[in-house]
Image (cartoon, rainbow, N blue to C red):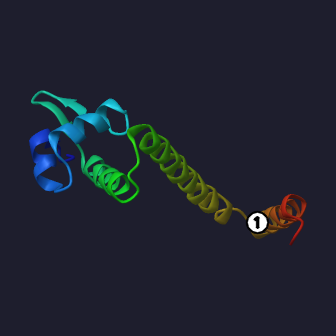
Amino acid sequence: MARHYSETEVVAILEDLDPARLHSFIAAHVVTPVVTPDGPAFTDADVARLQLLCDLSEVYDLPDDALAMVMSLIDQLNTARGDMRALIQAVASEPDEVRGRIQKSVHRLRIVTTGRG
């Protein structure tokens, strides 16, 4: 069962996070607590995301709307990486001749799109 952290616990864990900042992140929809019988709670992934949000807002002084855009791009990149891992595994499970055709096709497409091989 996944561990859930209350708002109070999350604020205690992350030294750069206070209740007002946490609520601004929630309002900006860059983190969404799960609903539990004990109230809103956060997963380990949420805690890591909140740490990243604190770092980004501190280091780059990003406003909430910019943070939302950056986090959306990070989410898209992570999704693409997962898709790529799955595609690589699927291709690896194919016979040699299929993998060879895929490799040649990728090479041709890279030449077309980049002008280089």
Name the residue rendered at 70%, 62% in the picture: 94
Above or below, comparing residue 13 to residue 38 in the picture: below
Quadrant of the image occupied by residue 59? bottom left
On the image, the x and y values in percent for residue 80 come to 58, 51
Quadrant of the image occupied by residue 91? bottom right
Left or right: 82 as drawn, with respect to 100: left
Q: Which one is in front, 67 or 81?
A: 67
Left or right: 65 as drawn, with respect to 109: left
Q: Which residue is mark 1?
A: 99
Q: Residues within 10 Å of mark 1 (few under 14, many from 20)?
A: some
Q: Which one is in front, 14 or 63?
A: 63
Name the residue rendered at 48%, 47% in the picture: 70
Q: Which one is in front, 7 or 42?
A: 7
Name the residue rendered at 30%, 52% in the picture: 54
- Image quarter in which the C terminus is found: bottom right
For badge 1, the amino acid type reads Arg
Task: Return the residue found at the far bottom.
Answer: 117
Tag 1 secondary structure = helix
Task: Return the residue found at the far front.
Answer: 61
On the image, the x and y values in percent for residue 45 come to 30, 50
